[in-house]
Image (cartoon, grey):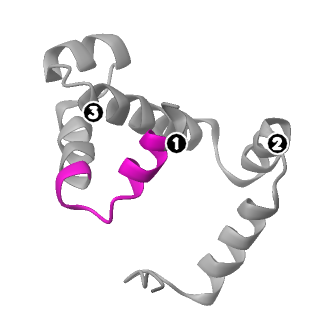
Amino acid sequence: MSYQSKFQNKDLDLLFDGILSLENKEECYRFFEDLCTINELQDLGQRIRVALMLDDHVSYAHITEKTHASTATISRVNRALSYGADGYKLILKRIKK
């Protein structure tokens, strides 16, 4: 069974095909540096760090202290972990190995 996203379109398919073609971390850095602003990349990285900490049952206060994420960002990530498409869970499972 294939997952069908409510956001799926040809442009995103092309983007994700490009991401999936990257072979290592250096290629990721190069591509995302061209694709995103530094703030966008930092925000994405921060969300992954927040997700890791939430998955480890760290308090909002401690997450804010360590990541400088707003409580709105933490709540958004927490909501995605609880009710989202399980994308964070998939990634967390793989990077925690």
Classify residue 39 as left or right of residue 31: left
Q: What stretch is highlighted in magenta?
A: 81-93
Q: How crowded is mark 1: few (under 14 residues within 10 Å), some or many (20 or more)?
A: few
For residue 55, the mark is 3
Residue at 36% x, 49% y is 89
Residue shown at the point (72%, 47%) measured from the top left: 32
Tell me where residue 26 appears, x and y as whole percent: 84, 36
Residue 1 place in picture, x, y as percent:
45, 86
Q: Which circle marks residue 24 in the picture?
A: 2
* 91 magenta-colored: yes
**In this picture, is 81 found above or below 46?**
below
The disc, 2 or 1, on the residue closer to the chain's N-terminal end is: 2
The numbered mark, 3 or 2, whose residue comes first in the sequence reads 2
Is label 3 in a helix, a strand or a loop? helix
Secondary element at tag 2: loop
User: Where is mark 1, residue-wise?
Assistant: 94
Answer left or right for 10 relative to 74.
right
Q: Nearer the viewer, residue 67 or 91?
A: 91
Of circles 2 and 1, which is in front? 1
User: Camera-side residue: 12 or 20?
Assistant: 20
Give amino acid for label 1.
Answer: Arg
- Determine the CA span between mark 2 and mark 1: 16 Å
Q: Do the residues labelled 2 and 1 touch (CB within 8 Å)?
A: no
Q: Dot 1: what SS?
A: helix
Between 42 and 86, the one nearer to me in the picture: 86
Name the spot of residue 68 as percent of width and height, x first: 33, 19
* Contact? badges 1 and 3 (CB < 8 Å): no
